[in-house]
Image (cartoon, grey):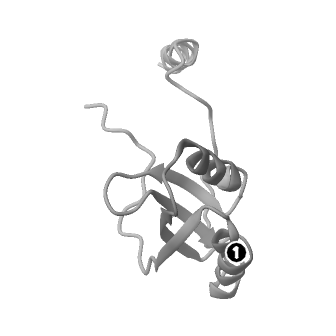
Amino acid sequence: STTTCWRRIQHLEAAGIIKGRVALLDRTRLGLDMTIFAHIKLATTSRDAIAQFEAAIRDRSEVLECHTLTGEWDFLLKIVAPNMKSYESFYLDYLSRIPCVRSVNSAVAVTAIKESTLLPLG
């Protein structure tokens, strides 16, 4: 029943399992047609450099996700932009100017085969 469902949601919120509620927006209809994945390599992986990079991108609305990585690259960013010119501006005027950034390798997503927010709860 609806009442049982809402009780379960309230329980999950109280337990801290539900971090928040959101509306899923259609990026294309909002004019955010491009998704870019950018691998970032820092000049050094000291705690200070990592903290500097995290602080530099944390509040950038273009950056939907930022993950630290193992291996060759230090970070992976998921970025949205209305068009290539807009991403170019973000890259040239901001991302490439973060002092601790050594290199950026960007890839533009052509087609989204699967995008989901559902977790595999089994």
User: Would you place residue 84 above or below residue 58 in this image?
Assistant: below
- The reply to whether residue 66 is visible in this rendering is yes
Reply above or below: 96 against 17.
below
Where does the image place residue 55, in percent across and percent down from the top left?
68, 48
Indicate the position of residue 11 as horizontal and vertical percent values. 52, 12
Which of these two is toward me, 49 or 4?
49
The quarter holding residue 64 reads: bottom right
Please state the horizontal and vertical placement of residue 51, each as a whole percent of the image.
61, 45
Q: How many marks?
A: 1
For image coordinates 40% across by 62% down, the residue present is 73
Label 1: how many Cα within 10 Å (few below 14, some 14–19, many 20+): some
Nearer to me, 110 or 101:
101
Q: Is residue 82 left or right of residue 120?
A: right
Residue 97 left/right relative to 117: right
Locate residue 62 relative to residue 7 in the image: left or right.
Answer: right
Residue under the point 42% across and 52% down: 116
**Given the image, on which type of amino acid does mark 1 rest?**
Phe
Q: Residue at x 31, y 57 (%)?
A: 71
Secondary structure under badge 1?
helix
Residue at x-position 57% and y-position 18%: 13
Tell me residue 42's x, y (percent): 51, 61
Front-most of residues 34 and 68: 68
> As displayed, is residue 47 above or below residue 107?
above
Residue denoted by label 1: 90
Kindly tell me whether residue 36 is visible in this rendering: no
Quadrant position of the C terminus in the picture: top left
